[in-house]
Image (cartoon, rainbow, N blue to C red):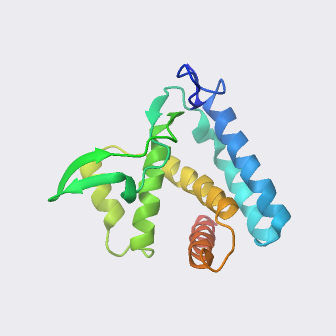
Amino acid sequence: RCYGPYKSKLHGAVGSWREQVRKDFCSNLDPIRSNGLVHDGILSRVEDYFKDHDYVLDYHDPRLLHGDLRFDNIMVKNGKFMAIIDANDSWSGDPMSDLASIYNEFLKQDPSGKKGLMESFDKGYGKVDRERINFYLVTLWVWGLRFFKLTEKNKACYGKILKNLKRFLDEEA
């Protein structure tokens, strides 16, 4: 069993899911800290959350993951599912990390949760682990803060990511 990005012979890059996610998280957090765009207090809270909840990484049943599961990559025609496209970020790991990407899409459309999009998804999808999804949402937002440079083009997106992260951390406190 291997985890992480697939290589040429469909073998994961690392031996454990914990190792893969921790490696990705740290490699994203360091550049955010060095660019100074996110207050150290917020970054400390993110690190504390990660450490306090990293037990969700004790996942030992790797599944094929899309890696970039968002509405733009889900093809629907006349209200019917047709396909999932753009699988070049596929990897092996916990399927709740892919679902976190879908939850992030819901948050873009319904930041307050008042429309009940996530609850409707939970009902239709079946068994989901919200604690694991929340953990992966935090890692996804950290990734976004690293890669969405604070340019005029991305300023709104960067601001939304930071707002979602702050709101989540405040609710967890």
Quadrant for the N terminus in the image: top right
User: In the displayed structure, would residue 11 be above or below residue 106?
Assistant: above
- Number of labels in the image equals 0
Quadrant for the C terminus in the image: bottom right
- Front one among 65 and 170: 65
Q: Position of residue 72 (x, y in %)?
A: 38, 58
Q: Residue at x 72, y 53 (%)?
A: 28
Q: Residue at x 33, y 45 (%)?
A: 84
Residue 154 placement: quadrant: bottom right
Residue lying furthest left in this view? 78
User: In the displayed structure, would residue 82 be above or below residue 138?
Assistant: above
Q: Position of residue 46 (x, y in %)?
A: 70, 59
Q: Residue at x 67, y 76 (%)?
A: 151
Position of residue 37 in the picture relative to residue 149 (left or right)? right
- Front one among 70 and 9: 9
Position of residue 115 in the picture relative to residue 63 (left or right)? left
Residue 8 placement: quadrant: top right
User: In the displayed structure, would residue 73 be above or below residue 43?
Assistant: above
Residue 169 placement: quadrant: bottom right
Residue lying furthest right in this view? 34
Q: Position of residue 132 (x, y in %)?
A: 51, 47
Position of residue 149 in the picture relative to residue 31 (left or right)? left
Position of residue 53 in the picture relative to residue 30 (left or right)? left
- Front one among 24 and 169: 24
User: In the displayed structure, would residue 51 be above or below residue 151?
Assistant: above
